Image (cartoon, rainbow, N blue to C red):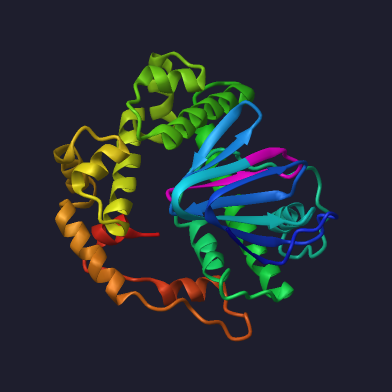
Amino acid sequence: MRIRTLNQPTALHDENALVSVRGCTYEASFRDHLLAVRWVRGGRQQVVFGARSVALDDDTYLFVNEGRSYDVRFTNSTTMQSFAVYVRCGLAAQVFAGLRAPADELDVEPTGDVVFDEHLHAHDSVVSPVLRFLERHVDVGTAEPAWFEEQVVFLLERMFRTQTDLARREAAVGAAREATRREIVRRVALARDYIHSCYERPITLAHMGAAAALSPHHLLRLFKLVNGCTPREYLQAKRTRMAARLIASTDLTLEEIAHRVGFEDRSTLGRQLRRTFGVNPRQMRRASQSVSAAAPQPPRTQEGRASAPQASRQSKVRPQSGAIRDALAE
């Protein structure tokens, strides 16, 4: 097992850190720890909060709030990589206060605790590009504190944008009381966590409802209200994305991939890929092979000072088909 860090989180919780663990097995416990963003490459990782457990994979990331106690573990047949950004105490509140401050008010004191949504998030165009940028610098070893602080602040600003999206979802729920709206969104998020963590199994609406402590009928109605799609549509989309990743990154047969992600057979997989991306599995595999052959080297920074947006633009690979590009996007 190999562990690399950019900065090391101290017992005083006064430093930001980026930690990467590469190996087949790993287990760690965190008690009253720092605010963290966690994600993985090439496998699955269990994150356990007491009686609640979620499974991170290549398709998701997770916020863990400051002061949380939790356990992390993975056991994989092949080498995988786990990443975590730890945010020093108080920085999130400072960034949040700065975002709320009027343009002419430079010094605003942070008030209250900052709390993020502790559910699995599918990789997106808001937070994920920053995570991928930081990921590429783990092996480079860029460790200048000022540079890393900038990246963490940039990440926090993106995290707050996802919270704004959560607030919109709550507002879209028709319940009169704010507490009721928040509880509905929380329970629907539990159903999404279940889908992300168990997508490869045979899942029914009853299973998802049990995870959210809702009847199947109520889950169906509320899930569509919050997410704009049914639980089954969300599940099929998750399976399709994971299948696209396996097509791009492995030599598994289409039949093996279909069963690994929970589809009944390869024909079902093919239909879903065509419906989602407009290509069949063979076209997707050929496109992924050509993209891999043309992929550029990881970006090099000038004294560790490259900004996240610049590095993201330099490292993008654009396949001919936009649909295939989305399917293979990291």
Left or right: residue 203 compared with residue 197: left
Count up the numbered dots: 0
Left or right: residue 107 compared with residue 171: right
**Would you say residue 65 sits in the magenta stretch?**
yes
Which residues are the magenta region? 58-71
Residue 225 seen anywhere in this rendered image of the structure: yes
Which quadrant of the figure contains the N terminus?
bottom right
Q: Is residue 9 above or below residue 34?
A: below
- Decide which of 87, 109 is in the foreground and name it: 87
Residue drawn 32% across the image and 26% down it: 202
Which quadrant of the view contains residue 286? bottom left
Which quadrant of the figure contains the C terminus?
bottom left
Query: Residue 179 in the image: x percent, y percent?
Result: 63, 24
Residue drawn 44% across the image and 19% down it: 209
Which quadrant of the view contains residue 19? bottom right
Query: Residue 13 in the image: x percent, y percent?
Result: 81, 55
Query: Residue 93 in the image: x percent, y percent?
Result: 76, 52
- Decide which of 146, 249 is in the foreground and name it: 249
Left or right: residue 274 compared with residue 160: left
